[in-house]
Amino acid sequence: MAIKIVPRGDVPPNQINDYFKFSCPPEFNGPNPDPLPPTFSFSRKLLVGIDLLLPDGSKVPMWVIEDPDAPDAPHPLPKDILRRSFPSPTLRIPLDALVNADVDCNGNTHTIHWHGIEPTPMNDGVGHLSFEVTGHFTYQYQPRQAGTFFYHCHKNTVLHFEMGLYGLLLIDPPDPSAPAVPVTYPTGGPGFAAGMNPNALLPTDHVIHYDVEALWVADDIDSRWHTLQHNAFMQKCVPDDPDNPANFSQDGILNDFRPDIFVMTGIARRVSDPSAFTAAENPLFGPLVAPTVKAGQTLLVRTLVAAYAVAQFTLDIDVEVIAMDGHALGVPPLQQYSRPLLVRAGTPIRLTTARRWDLIVRPTSPRVVPVKVEFFNNINGRLLYTATTSITVTK
Ligand SMILES: [Cu+2]
């Protein structure tokens, strides 16, 4: 059968430039060109340098996106850990909010890409498809699906993402008992997540209540990359001479990734250190990596692969996959022909870079559930590192 070709419309001469892919993206600094009154606002600043601490006392320099409005953290946490953490501070936004995101870029250009939200191109911060922010820009968008997303800088992306310029972006659905009230839930739980409810009467009933929330952000670090400069190995820009070799990516090491440090939500290990990732070692992130839940309660595990390696999660307990990449399985209108997925205890869940699966765990009796996160080289499949942690189920 011949495939019908859909002709493209003519592009008016005055719009031709709008359809080029930018080899040298323009820069922009100013207000949103199409501002609407927001129902939810926040600020982010980039970049800020922090050190990632390893158990042996050594440090890796990271770049993070600051939340300048976060309060001081309570003792014994470092005072500014809620403002400046790696991963960058988690964002929670009510479903359907009209969002204004005030972004400041200090000293150099960046973007923020709201991965999976799909705003208009000028609001989506995708490298080389729109502008780079020189000073300040107010991104504006409306998240229309509840679930697990992430935000990250999209300038010199492989380097800036590796350096830590990313964080989780969680879109919270309303409590079904008050579906008109926009809410966000405390990180760690309890709350509601978008998920198929076979007894739903209304669209807003397609949520699952959870008691405890875990955030499993798998990352890997090549410490050689963490000495590089902001614009390392970027193409030069010679716009008047489009064939100039300097316009194309330069030789460098950004196609040569050799991770020597592995991270679960901000807790790091050198490749030679097989010790388990525990709740006690990091008061902010530890309980999100190694959660404790009571028998009979519901645990929501949000995964994000921020590694360039393939990450494989294996839990010694049955899990129900309720959402993939911000799409809640079985939930109309967009996912009504899919269904949540049962993954039996011991069956690996293998995810590649940028993927997010949301897992529901319902432990019925007190025990310690072993969890394994294996990192595999994305080209040759070789096992690079095995991270171990656990879910503690109490009475
Ligand atoms: Cu950046």
Image (cartoon, grey):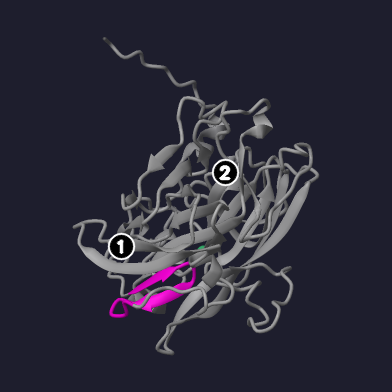
**SS under mark 1:** strand
Mark 2 close to ligand 1, CB under 8 Å? no
Give the residue type at disc 2.
Ile
Q: Name the secondary structure under disc 2.
A: loop
Q: Position of residue 353 (x, y in %)?
A: 38, 54
Above or below, comparing residue 264 to residue 56 in the picture: above
Q: Is residue 109 shown left or right of residue 367?
A: right
- Compared to residue 234, the image places residue 170 above or below, namely above
Range of the magenta residues? 261-274
Q: Toward the viewer: 371 or 185? A: 371
Quadrant in the picture for the N terminus: top left
Residue 375 numbered mark, or none: 1
Q: Could you say which quadrant of the image residue 389 lies in?
A: bottom left
Are there few (<14), some (14-19), or many (20+) residues within 10 Å of tag 2? Answer: many
Looking at the rendered image, the quarter that the C terminus falls into is bottom right
Gap in angstroms between the C-alphas marked 1 and 2: 27 Å
Horizontal arrangement in the rendering, residue 388 relative to residue 141 (left or right): left
**In the visual, does 131 lie left or right of 228?**
right
The residue to which callout 2 is attached is 117
Which of the two discs, 1 and 2, labels the residue nearer the N terminus? 2
Which residue is pictured at 46% across the width and 40% down the height? 20
Q: Is residue 280 covered in magenta?
A: no
Camera-near label (1 vs 2) is: 1
